[in-house]
Amino acid sequence: MDDLQNRTQEAVAAVSNAASLDALDALRVEALGKQGWVSQLLKTLGKMTPDERQEKAPKIQSARVAIADAIEARKAAIEAEELERRLATETLDLTLPAPQTPKGSVHPVSQVMDELSEIFADLGFAVKTGPEVEDDWHNFTALNMPESHPARAMHDTFYFPDHDGEGRRMLLRTHTSPVQIRTMVAEGAPVRIIAPGRVYRSDSDATHTPMFHQIEGLVIDRDIHLGHLKWTLETFLKAFFEREDIVLRLRPSYFPFTEPSVEVDVGFEVVDGKRVLGGSGDAPGHGWMELLGSGVVNRRVIEFAGLDPDEWQGFAFGVGVDRLAMLKYGMDDLRAFFDGDRRWLQHYGFSPFDQPTLSAGVGAPIGGRA
Ligand code: DAH
């Protein structure tokens, strides 16, 4: 067994001096490979008497472990040396142009939300968010839609099977309007916010997906009236579509959370067979398209949120972000927004270096200026 110890020491010493990974591997094969001397010794165990095996097996095993460990350690050392050597010889010329690598792009929905945030920030609006998993009080009741309200049924709501720990009925929010309530409850008045985000309804075809995006607007202050709403929407749409000739038509409508409620149509003209916002609406070849819902915040909503409706009034609006993106950038199938097809993303996506700012223009050109 002295012989085994000597051989092991020699092997470990040789391993520690191995100059390269190839040399190291040759040493590994010599000792631990199928025909290696340690492997051969291990094979002799089978023919030994139990006593003899009990004495020799641990020694052979520890020789194997000692050599294997030495190889492992030397391998790590050689690799580290090689890396050091490479780093010492390589230089990086930072003045060279960046290599062509696959690039990600900013999704049009993100881009449009950023454009909207930029436009509304300029008008003094803060950006708020709320939870996508909502309770039915915030999503419905506080927005003046009690349990029995028919509007609840129209929302095709995804409910969770169980109530939460406090006995609340939970759902995926069907609109961004609950952020109105959350903001008023948390911050009181005055309020001037927009709330962009995901909303969910059980609906699916070329113009509806079960998840889509809305942006909510809410202004609460003293003596607010419909004129403020109209000016705000006009200013926002002109900035967003980058056209001065955006005309609005306010039509009476009904939403439980606004009174009066108005549906807002925008004038369009037809250019190359496509509807483009702008123009006079009523002229021949022009028309009106329904764009968003809005109104004066219902007194009951202000009360639900804990404010005094005799002191505070406001207006609110809600608009589909995906729809705004389609109108501005010309996509016609909403489903493609959420397919994650790289060709679509490359074509309609935006460069991360091309973020909307009012000074540079909120209308980045579409498609791979990346
Ligand atoms: N929450 C409404 C919906 O999803 C949209 C809406 C209409 C929001 C009128 C408003 C509003 O804030 O005033 O259909």
Image (cartoon, rainbow, N blue to C red):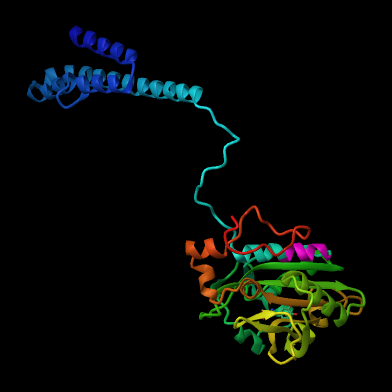
Q: Which residue is drawn at 61% across and 56% down?
A: 351
**Magenta segment, which residues?**
116-123
Residue 170 visible from this viewpoint: no
Q: Is residue 82 left or right of residue 47?
A: right
Q: Does the magenta stretch include residue 120?
A: yes
User: x, y percentage for residue 12?
Assistant: 29, 14
Q: How many marks can you see?
A: 0
User: x, y percentage for residue 278?
Assistant: 73, 80
Residue closer to the observer: 78 or 119? 119
User: x, y percentage for residue 260?
Assistant: 81, 87
Q: Is residue 327 left or right of residue 317?
A: left
Residue closer to the observer: 356 or 46? 356
Name which quarter of the figure residue 312 lies in.
bottom right
Quadrant in which ligand 1 is drawn: bottom right
Q: In this view, does 339 lie above or below 299?
A: above
Residue closer to the observer: 22 or 213? 22
Residue closer to the observer: 62 or 50? 62
Quadrant including the N terminus:
top left
Residue 117 visible from this viewpoint: yes
Q: In this view, does 283 lie to the left or right of 367?
A: right
Residue lying at the far front in this picture: please name it.
272
Name which quarter of the figure residue 360 lies in.
bottom right
Quadrant including the C terminus:
bottom right
Q: Which residue is drawn at 51% across and 74% down?
A: 335
Q: Is residue 336 left or right of residue 247?
A: left
Q: Is the magenta stretch mostly helix, strand or loop?
A: helix
User: x, y percentage for residue 7?
Assistant: 21, 10
Q: Does the magenta stretch include residue 345?
A: no
Q: Residue at x 50, y 26 (%)?
A: 90
